[in-house]
Image (cartoon, rainbow, N blue to C red):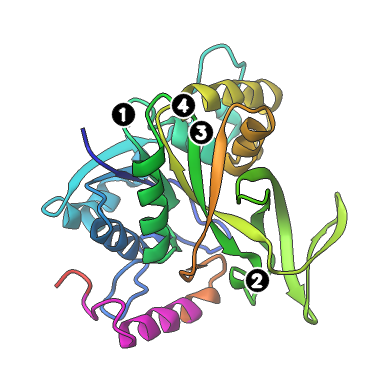
Amino acid sequence: MSKLTLLVMAAGMGSRYGGLKQIDPMGPSGETLLDYAVYDALRTGFDRLVFIIRRDFEELFKRQIGEKFTTRVAVDYVFQELHELPPGTGAEPSVRQKPWGTTHAIWSARNVLKGPFVAVNADDFYGRDAYQRVGDYLLAHSSPSKAKFAMAGYRLDKTLSEFGSVARGVCLVDKENRLLEVDEMTKIQRIDGVIANRDPARGQTVLTGAEPVSMNFWGFTPALFPLIEERLIAFLKSNGKDPKAESYIPSVVSELVSNNQAEVAVLPTNGRWFGVTYTEDKSKVQAALKELVAQGEYPEMLWA
């Protein structure tokens, strides 16, 4: 059985960005953000990769991304399919053009994960520190049968885009940094120095910027799967005919915590997060990676 698995959620369409971000070169030698994720995972002790992808870009993804890792680490694939759902939900995949969200993505990997794993977005940069902290926590505290999980907590103000609003899971924690609640805010932006969630449906919520947020860097065990299947069934029964509704894993985890079905440690990380939400973010990400290379954190040619 593998020690630690990196589960990479790469089935998203990148609709706001305008392309398949997962294979877009960002590093000084043409590396993708996914290359840096795998590099950091391998150097902190992970020994298996599982990619969640869609069948319509399977060949392209394997050729341009997956094949470069097969000589370095065990690699497997699972497919997030619109029609692969728990039975009896009444959901109608035919009304949709994209999958059902990150809860559905992780549930899609239920049959291939038997040990602790970290789930991440394919198009985000998280930094080595997050992989080290969450990986170490899982190895020290978790077992396949216990719903004792972890997440990397980033400061909200370090995760914003200059070019539009972002969605963030804003976390409320107790004195021991255990998660109490995740508030999924979808319209957070800094305007004239004020950070706020400006959502017409719920009004304006002013934030300090110091709040810990979920950037979808989760440490789980297989104890998660029966719990999220129950939540996914409930979601699909209520939203299965909605062409746009998605089930987000931060909200599901928040519900599990509220119901005392899981415990989640929020592990503060001093690593940098950055990602490409909008096309204009790309130059900022490229400059940040170049700076990290200059500081000696990464080699100029990642896989040389």
Counting residues from the start of the chain, the first of labels 4 and 3 encountered is: 3
On screen, 113 above or below 300?
above
Majority secondary structure of magenta residues: helix
CA–CA distance in space, label 4 to label 1: 11 Å
Which amino acid is tagged 3?
A: His
C-beta proximity under 8 Å, tags 4 and 3: no
Spatial distance from mark 4 to mark 2, Cα to Cα? Answer: 32 Å
Mark earlier in primary sequence (2, 3)? 3
Q: Which residue is mark 4?
A: 225
* Labelled pair 3, 1 in contact (Cβ < 8 Å): no
Helix, strand or loop at disc 2?
A: helix
- Which of the two discs, 2 and 3, sits closer to the camera? 2
Say whether disc 4 or disc 1 marks the residue closer to the N-terminus.
Answer: 1
Which residue lies at the image location 46% right of the left edge and 69% below the top edge?
271
Tell me if residue 85 can be seen.
yes
Provide the secondary structure element on which disc 4 rests. Answer: helix
x%, y% of residue 36?
A: 32, 65
Residue where numbered disc 3 is placed? 104
Residue 213, how many percent across, how many down?
A: 62, 57
Whole-Å distance between the Cαs marked 4 and 3? 10 Å
Start-end of magenta stretch: 284-301
Q: Secondary structure at mark 1?
A: loop
Q: Quickly name the residue at label 2.
A: 157
Q: Nearer the viewer, residue 132 or 303?
A: 132
- Pointer 1 residue: 114
Visible in this render: residue 247? no
Quarter placement of the N terminus: top left
Measure the alpha-carbon separation of dots 1 and 2: 36 Å
Q: Is residue 287 magenta?
A: yes
Measured Cα–Cα span from mark 3 to mark 1 = 18 Å
